[in-house]
Amino acid sequence: MASEQETVRRRLLELLDRPGNGVCADCGAPGPEWASFTLGIFMCQSCSGIHRNIPQISRVKSIFLDPWENSEVEFMASTGNSAAKAKYEQKVPAFYYCPTHTDCQLLREQWIRARYERSEFIHVERQEPYSAGYREGFLWKRGRDNGQFLSRKFILSEREGALKYFNKHDAREPKALMKIQTINATFQPTKIGNPHGLQITYLKDNSTRNIFVYHEDGKEMVDWFNAIRAARFHYLQVAFPGAHDVDLVSKLTRNYIKEGYMEKTGPKHTEGFKKRWFTLDDRRLMYFKDPLDAYARGEVFIGSKESGYTVLPGLPSSTQGYHWQFGITIVTPDRKFLFACETEDEQKEWIAVFQGVVNRPMLPQEYAVEAHFKHKP
């Protein structure tokens, strides 16, 4: 005869088969093996670690390893992921970034705290820090030349359509003015070396400029991120009046398609290969001497195959000089770009992402970007 725990466990496994329960309630990772018996949700191991830090709200157990009470299982049966979603996500703003299991720890932690601890999506007034259209405060910003992080005042104004920062606390004029229409923000904890590190990019004279910031308080940093997304959302709503919200949301911020080291040679292909840090941001392939440089050393536009762009494994047989052995050639209408990867796996990964970009038809506004690249001095 099955023991009581075996019966309880079987009941839990049956609950996992219900719609909504087969993925983590918080990040969508498949195959959850943990559950919060106070919130009635199933979750992945990674999110369960975050729940452990808010024991006043959430108490977690392993579905497979911990003993369960009948009453706890009944509570799980009466709630579940779909019911919790309906309760805790009643008023999530369209622009708010809802992280997935591939996102950094900070985004997932603040999403979990916003839902269950602060009830931000039940009480709209708690969304003020990122929905007000204006925000000011101090962030630690990396110096362009010395690499030191210094406290800088930042102001985001939806009305002015800009994010500004000031070098001196009493300065009248901003050190930089970043227009909302060209701004992007993406969390880069590993690259910046801080769990709350955010990379903000904007276009200055149609070249990409990077700034790297963080705040000690994780909530503060995620609020800045969502405030930037809110400002971008409202700008795009005005710029594209007929567009659906769902189409605009995908344009608010973007993570880079891929980053990493490759080697490259110059336009004549007779110079030596130099190791550079590459960032593929949509159709812009940028390369830097150092991952935390303010400006790229150069940018390559990658169009579509219809416009004469192709990606080939290997390098032309005439290539000179010492280089890593796993080559990639990108053919554009104007010239060939030669790159080399250290390992075959990296070569395959880069070729796959380049191929994905080349296979995508170009949008009307991308032709204007391509034209600018062609006329760049």
Image (spheres, helix red, strand yellow):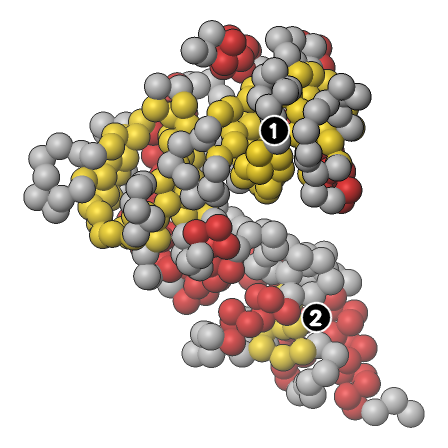
Q: Residues within 10 Å of mark 1 (few under 14, many from 20)?
A: some
Could you tell me which quadrant the C terminus lies in? top left
Say left or right for 227 vs 344.
left
Residue 125 vs 229, above or below: the answer is below
Residue 336 vs 245, above or below: the answer is above
Residue 175: which quarter of the image? Answer: top left
Give the SS element for disc 1. loop
Mark closest to the chain's N terminus, 1 or 2: 2
Q: Residue at x 54, y 25 (%)?
A: 284
Residue 291 lies, in percent from the top left, at 48, 43
Residue 6 vs 330, above or below: the answer is below
Q: Residue at x 9, y 35 (%)?
A: 172
For label 1, the residue is 272
Q: Residue at x 30, y 52 (%)?
A: 148
Could you tell me which quadrant the N terminus lies in? bottom right
Residue 2: which quarter of the image? Answer: bottom right
Task: Quote the CA–CA distance across marks 1 and 2.
Answer: 52 Å
For label 2, the residue is 33
Residue extending furthest right? 1
Numbered mark located on residue 280 in the image: none
Q: Residues within 10 Å of mark 2 (few under 14, many from 20)?
A: many
Q: Nearer the viewer, residue 373 or 21?
A: 373
Q: Does the rendering let one see residue 168?
A: yes
Residue 42 lies, in percent from the top left, at 64, 67
Amino acid type, label 2: Glu
Say left or right for 55 vs 209.
right
Q: Does the rendering let one see residue 125?
A: no
Q: Are marks 1 and 2 in contact (CB under 8 Å)?
A: no
Give the SS element for disc 2. loop
